[in-house]
Image (spheres, rainbow, N blue to C red):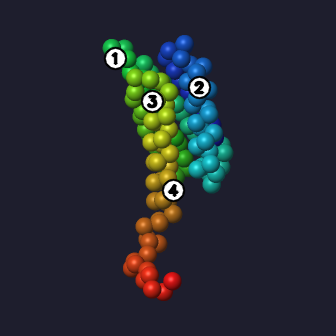
C-alpha cells in the first residue's frame, strides 16, 4: 500500500502520521487480494479555525473503485479512529458487493428438525 499524508499543522504532523500508519497496517489485512502498488491511501488532517475540531479525511484508491470517508471530533485521535472505522466498514461493504454475496444468500430457512 502506498501511504501519504498531508497535515497543515506542523506540531500535529508527527503524532498524526505515526497513528495513521499504525491504523493503515491494520487495514492491510482487508486489502491482501490487491497488488501492493495498486492500493493508495491518502490521509489529510485539518484543524478547524473557529472551532476546536479536527477533520481527518481518508481517500483510498483501489483498482476496483475509490472510497472516501471523514472523521470529525474535538480530539485528533478520536477523529482518526472514526475515519478508519468508517473506511473499514466501507471496504467490507465494497468487497461484499464485488463477491456478489447477495446472490448467494440462502433463499429459504433451514429446518431445525434435520439436525
Image point (51%, 83%), residue name:
115
Across and down, in percent, residue 8 comes to 49, 17
In this view, the mark in front (4 or 1): 1
Q: Residues at badges 3 and 2 in contact (C-beta under 8 Å)?
A: no
- Mark 4 crowdedness (10 Å alpha carbons): few <14, some 14-19, many ≥20: some
Q: Name the residue under label 1.
A: 51
What SS does tag 4 mark?
helix
Q: Name the residue under label 2.
A: 17
The label shown at residue 115 is none
Q: In this view, does 115 lie above or below 33?
A: below
Q: Name the residue under label 3.
A: 79
In this view, the mark in front (3 or 2): 3
Across and down, in percent, residue 52 comes to 37, 17
Q: Quick one: label 2 or label 1, which is nearer the N terminus? A: 2
The label shown at residue 95 is 4
How far apart, in angstroms, are the residues tagged by discs 3 and 4?
24 Å
Q: Quick one: label 3 or label 1, which is nearer the N terminus? A: 1
Q: Is residue 26 above or below residue 95?
A: above
What SS does tag 2 mark?
helix
Image point (42%, 34%), residue name:
70
Q: Quadrant of residue 16?
A: top right
How far apart, in angstroms, are the residues tagged by discs 3 and 2?
13 Å
Amino acid at each position: 500500500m502506498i501511504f501519504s499524508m498531508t497535515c497543515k499543522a506542523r506540531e500535529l504532523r508527527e503524532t498524526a502520521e505515526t497513528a495513521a500508519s499504525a491504523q493503515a497496517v491494520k487495514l492491510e489485512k482487508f486489502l491482501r487480494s490487491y497488488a501492493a502498488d495498486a492500493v493508495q491511501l491518502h490521509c489529510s488532517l485539518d484543524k478547524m479555525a473557529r472551532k476546536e475540531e479536527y477533520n481527518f479525511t481518508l481517500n483510498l484508491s483501489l483498482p476496483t473503485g475509490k472510497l472516501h470517508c471523514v472523521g470529525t471530533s474535538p480530539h485528533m485521535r478520536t477523529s482518526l479512529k472514526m475515519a478508519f472505522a468508517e473506511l473499514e466498514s466501507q471496504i467490507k461493504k465494497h468487497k461484499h458487493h464485488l463477491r456478489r454475496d447477495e446472490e448467494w444468500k440462502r433463499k429459504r430457512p433451514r429446518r431445525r428438525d434435520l439436525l
